[in-house]
Structure formats: C-alpha cells, structure tokens
C-alpha cells in the first residue's frame, strides 16, 4: 500500500505544522519592525501565558512524582496474591493465568546492552515462567545479531516460558527500516506460535520495549494489577514513567539534561491521561494489537501511532492508562563528546517527527463520525500545539522577545509599556526559573546510586547542569523540531536512526 502522502490533500496537510511555525517566526519579525508596540503587547501576553503553563506544569509534575514514590514501594505481586483481582472481562481469570509477551528489537547493539536488559527481566518480582520473549534481529545485522541473540538465549532462555528469536528480512515491501517494522515481523511470527500453544489472546499482555529498556522489578506486577482492575483492559494502553538512568553517570551534561527533560515532560502528561499518547516503551493488550493489525511498518513513530490506530479502531473508546512504576533506558552516550551531541540531536529530531501524527489525525478523524468531536479536537489540539510549542516557544521567548524594543522608534520607546517591557520579561523569566529549580531537585532524587569510587560532589554537578537547560531547549528542542516539521512539509521524510548504545 503506498503512503497516504501520495494524495495531494494529504501532502497539503503535511505542510500545515511547518507553515504555522515559520509563519509565527516571520510574523514576529514583521510585527517587530512595522508594529513594535503591538509586538510588545503580544510578547508580554505570550510570556504570561507560558508562566501560567509553567505553574500548572509544576502542579502536575509534583502530583506524578507523589504517585511515583508511592507505587515503587508497593510489592505488587503480593498485592495480586492477596487481593486476587479478576478482570471484568469474562474471558479473563486470575493474574497467574496471564502471560507477558515482550518485544525487544535489536540492531547492532553489543552483548552488554542486551545483558543488562535481560538481567532486569530476570530480577523482576514476578514469575518468569509467565514471560514470553520475542527478540527481533535485523537481517542487515544478521551475523552479529544472531550471535548475540543466541548468547543471550543460552544465558537466560531457561528462565522464561518461551524465548523466540526472529530475523527481520531486509527490503520487505511497504516497510521502513526501524523498530516498527522489526516488531511487526516478530509479532506475526509470535501470533503463529501463540496459536499453536492455544493461548487465548485475551490472556496476553504485550510490552514493546527498546532494547536498552530495564524494567523496574515491580513493573510487571504493577502492569498486571492495572490490567486486571481496569474496567476495559483491552481498550487502553499502559504507559510507564520513562527514566534515562542506565548510564547517566557516564554521559555528558548536555545529553543528560535533554533526556531528563523528556522524563519530566512525560511525568506531567501522566497526570493528564486525557491527553496522553503512548511513547517509547509501553504495554497493551495482545488481543487489541492483533485487532488493529499490529504497528505500522512504514513510519518512524510507531510508538505513538499505535495509540491512534486503537483510538480509531474503537471509535474513540480508547485511552492511555498511566503507570508510575518506571522503566529505565540509556541516555545518549557514544563514547565521544561530539558524536554524542550529534546523536542526541538526531534522537530528538526523530522524537519530534511525531508531528507526522498531525496530518494523520486530520485525515482519519474526518472519516470517523463515531468519535465525539470534542475528543478528536482535544487529541488533535494537544498534538499540534505540543509540536508547535516545542519548535517555537524557546526561540520566541529567549531570542525574539526583545526584537521589537530594538526596532521601536523614540515615541514608542517612551510609552510606559515599552519602558517596562524589559523589566516584565526579566521578572517572568526569573519566575520561570523556579520551575527549573524544582525540576533540578527532583532530577537528583531520580538518580541511581553513584558508582563506587565516585565523589559525592558529582551530585552538586548533576544539580548545576540544569543551567544548560535553556540552551538545550533551543539546540535540542526547537532546532530539531523545526527541521522535522520542515522536512515533513517539503517531503524529505525522515528515516529511523538507531541511537548507538555504549557500555
């Protein structure tokens, strides 16, 4: 099936995000030159709006943090055994009749990366004989990939109920190289094996993990509890907190603050499940995954797109359930400072490519009349506004905010609003730093134990590194987002770039 982008109307929809972004930049410059007083009013109102958003952001952040601290202390396996919950779905039974199918696609990662992932699975506070592992190797990396996969299976395979290794063929039609296409091939192979085992689809929970994902020891107990106590367990995905802690003591401060910024963005959204999309590592019902035809194999952002597939399939009766028990992944660290900087830029550009969901929603929502209009509007607005804000807000506030003061004539400069504008802007930015300080404090709490032999003074450096955050928001927030949206508008579609893992 050819991409929807071959349709003229869909191509037009793909240009809308970049048009909004570049239109805002050009409009800000034109207003600053020809109507600086109007521009000053707009900028002050804009900054006030974002100050209010920062306050709300902090409220949601602390709420999620409170849930996180509570949920990681619970022994969820004991809770399952004591409460013995049974799903409202009559096809379900007790928790110990459920299976966890875990997809782990790999490409050129060294044995050490997979080893830490599987150590995490083995150390889970959950019966490992309920785990089914689907380790997906790429034919592009067949020799190395199979060697590592077989070594992992030899070391850990006996812990699990089943351990499957698949080799995703290269150059399959209607596919793009990446995690999504690898997972689709592995899922189709898994379906055949599951049918042979005669396991009901309703009794399988799927987790789609990046290969460096280390699940918290309580993750699967918590996931099972959420699944069984949810009124519609097949009509929801389950999104955990995503920490980037695996190698955080070895990465550089730029990549650390970028990765931690992603964690805090997700934490705030977990407290607002009505706007939550799936992101990176997440879980869902196998029955649902099969019903929607698995992930889309020809896109980059299959992790968020699968939510929209389910939302459309269930005519709006689908949502994301937050999980405050985390999974941990790598910060970007290639072994070299400058290559790590380049790699984190490409990672952020790939994440910003989630803007491809904007035309997808506009196209498909118009055909589905069963989804309530306000629900469609909310998801569309949140997605579009988020992509727009990521690309524009850091630049508009820090770089273009003072531009109208430079171009204003003497009569405009003598007005009260113009004279007080720099003071107001400085006050707003200073107040916003309170949010940055709170984020820095919480980031210290999320840190894993410092490696033996390391100085405790590194905790202070971990706190002070957040002074880089405003710069990072432009270099690794706005710039890659602008590039991603411009690429989408011009038809220079982004491929899937695998971030190099280093131990």
Image: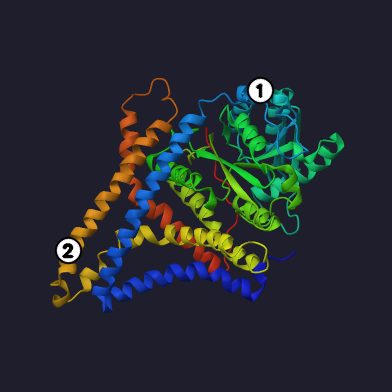
| Residue 41 x %, y % | 26, 69
- Residue shown at 49% from the left, 38% from the top: 244
SS at mark 2 in the image: helix
The answer to whether residue 254 is seen in the rendering is yes
Q: Is residue 168 visible?
A: no
Q: Residue furthest top?
A: 453
Left or right of residue 247, residue 305 in this image: right
> Residue 240 vs residue 432: left or right?
right
**How far apart are labels 2 and 1 at the CA level?**
63 Å
Which residue does the image show at 67% across and 71% down from the upper left? 6
User: Foreground residue, 51 or 79?
Assistant: 79
The correct choice, above or below, for 50 with respect to 334 in the image is: below
Look at the picture and state if 396 lies above or below 155.
below
Q: Which residue is mark 2?
A: 420
Residue picked out by circle 1: 81
Which badge, 2 or 1, comes first in the chain's sequence?
1
- Side of 374 relative to 103 (left or right): left
Residue 132 point in image, percent of width and height: 73, 32
């Amino acid at each position: 099936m050819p991409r929807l982008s071959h349709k003229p109307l869909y191509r037009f929809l793909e240009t809308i995000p970049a048009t909004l972004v570049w239109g805002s930049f050009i409009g800000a410059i034109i207003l600053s030159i020809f109507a600086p007083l109007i521009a000053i009013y707009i900028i002050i109102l804009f900054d006030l709006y974002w100050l209010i958003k920062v306050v709300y952001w902090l409220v949601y952040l602390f709420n999620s943090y409170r849930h996180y601290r509570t949920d990681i202390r619970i022994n969820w396996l004991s809770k399952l055994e004591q409460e013995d919950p049974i799903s409202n779905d009559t096809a379900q039974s007790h928790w110990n009749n459920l299976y966890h199918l875990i997809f782990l696609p790999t490409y050129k990662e060294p044995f050490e990366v997979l080893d830490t992932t599987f150590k995490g699975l083995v150390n889970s506070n959950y019966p490992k004989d309920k785990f089914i592992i689907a380790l997906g190797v790429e034919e592009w990396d067949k020799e190395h990939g199979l060697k590592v996969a077989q070594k992992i299976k030899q070391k850990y395979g006996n812990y699990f109920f089943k351990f499957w290794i698949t080799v995703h063929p290269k150059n399959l039609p209607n596919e793009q190289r990446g995690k999504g296409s690898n997972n689709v091939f592995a899922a189709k192979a898994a379906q055949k094996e599951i049918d042979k085992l005669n396991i009901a689809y309703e009794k399988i929970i799927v987790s789609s993990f990046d290969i460096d994902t280390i699940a918290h020891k309580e993750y699967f107990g918590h996931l099972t509890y959420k699944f069984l106590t949810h009124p519609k367990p097949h009509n929801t995905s389950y999104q955990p907190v995503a920490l980037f802690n695996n190698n955080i003591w070895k990465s550089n401060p730029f990549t650390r603050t970028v990765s931690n910024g992603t964690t805090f963005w997700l934490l705030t959204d977990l407290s607002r499940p009505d706007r939550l999309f799936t992101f990176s590592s997440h879980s869902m019902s196998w029955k649902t995954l099969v019903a929607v035809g698995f992930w889309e194999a020809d896109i980059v952002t299959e992790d968020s797109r699968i939510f929209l597939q389910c939302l459309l399939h269930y005519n709006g009766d689908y949502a994301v359930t937050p999980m405050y028990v985390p999974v941990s992944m790598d910060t970007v660290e290639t072994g070299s400072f400058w290559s790590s900087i380049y790699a984190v830029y490409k990672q952020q550009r790939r994440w910003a490519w989630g803007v491809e969901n904007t035309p997808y929603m506009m196209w498909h929502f118009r055909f589905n009349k069963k989804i309530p209009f306000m629900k469609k509007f909310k998801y569309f607005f949140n997605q579009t506004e988020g992509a727009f804000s990521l690309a524009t807000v850091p630049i508009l506030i820090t770089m273009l905010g003072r531009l109208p003061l430079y171009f204003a004539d003497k009569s405009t400069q003598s007005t009260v609003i113009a004279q007080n504008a720099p003071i107001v802007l400085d006050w707003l930015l200073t107040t916003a730093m309170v949010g940055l300080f709170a984020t820095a404090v919480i980031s210290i709490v999320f840190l894993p134990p410092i490696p033996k032999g390391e100085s405790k003074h590194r905790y202070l450096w971990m706190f002070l590194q957040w002074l880089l955050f405003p710069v990072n928001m432009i270099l690794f927030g706005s710039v890659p987002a602008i590039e991603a949206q411009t690429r989408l508008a011009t038809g220079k579609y982004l491929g899937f770039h695998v971030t190099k893992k280093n131990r």
